[in-house]
Image (spheres, rainbow, N blue to C red):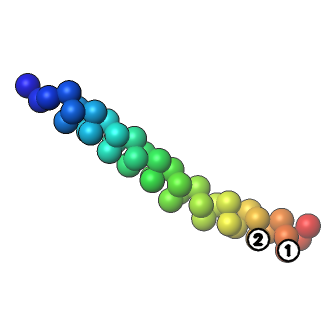
Amino acid sequence: MASAGLQILGVVLTLLGWVNALVSCALPMWKALLLAFLTFG
């Protein structure tokens, strides 16, 4: 059985992966929305 430290490390890396995926998907959309708002605002 894995130690508690390895389990915590796995959870932290998983959460960081989810955050990274969300940011990488949301960032281009926010940039496009901001550009459209400033252009046509």
Residue 31 placement (x, y as % from top left): 68, 66
Residue 26 placement (x, y as % from top left): 58, 55
Quarter containing the N terminus = top left
> Residue 32: which quarter of the image?
bottom right
Side (left or right) of 28 relative to 15: right
Q: Amino acid at mark 1?
A: Thr
Side (left or right) of 29 relative to 23: right
Side (left or right) of 2 relative to 19: left
> With respect to residue 7, does 28 lie above or below?
below
* Element class at badge 2: helix
Residue 37 placement (x, y as % from top left): 83, 65
Q: Residue furthest bottom?
A: 39
Which residue is labeled 1 in the image? 39
Which residue is labeled 2 in the image? 35
* Element class at badge 1: helix
Q: Residue furthest right?
A: 41
Q: Residue at x 79, y 68 (%)?
A: 36
**Tag 2 and tag 1, C-beta contact below 8 Å:** yes
Residue 29 placement (x, y as % from top left): 64, 61
Quarter containing the C terminus = bottom right
